[in-house]
Amino acid sequence: MKLNYPKEWFEKSALIEGDDEIGAGVPPVNWCAREDEASVESRIALGQFVELWRRDKGWNAERLANEAGIDTGEVLELEKDPHHEPEPDAVYKLANVFGVSSRKMMELAGLVQNRNPYLREEAIRFAAQADSISKLTDAEQQSLEAFVSALTLTN
Amino acid sequence: MNESIVYLHKAENNTFVEASLFDQVTDEHLAMWSNEWVPVMKKHVGDLKLENAPEDSHWDWKKKLAEVGHLLSYQSFALICEGDLQGLMIVSNVRSAKIQEQFGKPIVYVEFVSTAPWNRVEINKPVKYRGAGRIFILAAIESSREMGYGGRVGLHSLPQAERFYESKCGFKRLGPESTHQNLCYFEMTSSQADLFCQNM
C-alpha cells in the first residue's frame, strides 16, 4: 500500500485534525481473549449453512427469523459476520427449524466446546464448496445435504 | 515493505515537515516505541489515578505485533518523522460492515491506532506534530480500496477520540457495543471515504 497525495492534502488535513485525540481499539483484555481462527472458520461455515438452507427453501431472512422466533438481524449477522457471537437461544431455535443437532450447531457457533474433530473439517469443506451469491447449483445442493447429514448424525 | 511520503504540521515553527509512512512495523520501529515512547508515557501516567490515565497508555505494541504480525489478514503501519516514531496502527481485513446500506460487505477494521505521547495535547502542549490521525485513516481507506473493499473502514473509538472520528473524519457513529467494552463503533462508507480523501 502506497499513498500518493500531494503535500497540500496533508497541509489541509493537519489543520482539520487540530489537536484532537485519535486513539482507537479495544483494550488488551478483549484483544487477548479474541476469538481464535478455528471458531471464525466454523462460523463462516455456519453462516453459509444458514443462508443455503433458507435459500433452498425459497425463504428470505425475515421468513426464517419468523419461523424460528428470532430477530431478523440475528439471522443476517449469523449469515454475514463470522465475528458475531450468536445468542445460544437463537442457535437452538434455528437448529430446531433445520431439524439438525442443536449441540453441533452450538459447536459451529463457538458457543460450546468442540468435541467432534471431524465436524470442523466437514464445516470447512462445506464452506469451501458453497457459493452464497448464486442460485443453488446441483453441487451446492449435494454439499448442503451432506452437511445436514453431518449435523444430524449422532456421534 | 512500502514507504509513502507524507507531511506533518510541526507546531514549534509552524511548518510542514516530511514524514514516512511504512506499511509494516519493523523491529526498529518497536525499539523506538519502547525506548522513546514508553518512557514519556510512563512519566506522564506517573501518579495519575487509573481512570485519568490515557486508555492506551498500557498498550503493549510488541505483544500486539507478535500476536498478529505473521497473519496475512493483518497489516501494521508506522509513521516516522525526523527520526522519531510518531504513531502506530494495526488493521485487519476479515470483518464485515454494520451500516445498513453496506451490511455484510467486507471492511478494513482498525484494530489499534495511537499517536506518540508528545503529539497529544493532554501530555505535551503545544503538541509536537499534528496530522498523524488522518494520515492513518487515509492509509486504512487506501488499504480498503486496494483489497477491493471500496474504502469501507470500521473501528471502535476510545472515548476521548469520538469527536475526531465523527466530526473530523466523517465516520458514522453506530453507538457503544457491550462486546467491545462499551466503546463506540464507527464506520465509513465508500462515499464517505471519497469525501475524506478529497479533504472535505
Image: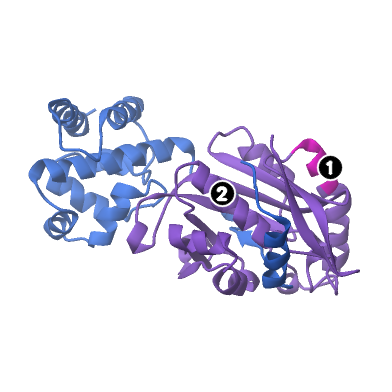
Chain colours: A blue, B purple
Q: Which residues are magenta?
A: B26-32
* Disc 2: which residue: B142
Determine if residue B189 is in view.
no
Is A69 contained in the magenta span? no
Q: Answer with the quarter of the image where residue B128 lies.
A: bottom right
Secondary structure category for the residue under label 1: helix
Picture disc at residue B31: 1
Q: What residue is at 65 percent from the left and 73 percent from the top?
A: B160
Q: Answer with the quarter of the image where residue B136 lies.
A: bottom right
Secondary structure category for the residue under label 2: helix
Q: Quadrant of the C terminus of chain B?
A: bottom right
Image-based side of A98 in relation to B37, left or right: left
Q: Is residue B128 above or below residue A139?
A: below
Q: Answer with the quarter of the image where residue A117 lies.
A: top left
Q: Amino acid at mark 1?
A: Ala
Say few, some or many: other residues with alpha carbon within 10 Å of mark 2 (under 14 / 14 to 19 / 20 or more): many
Q: Amino acid at mark 2?
A: Glu
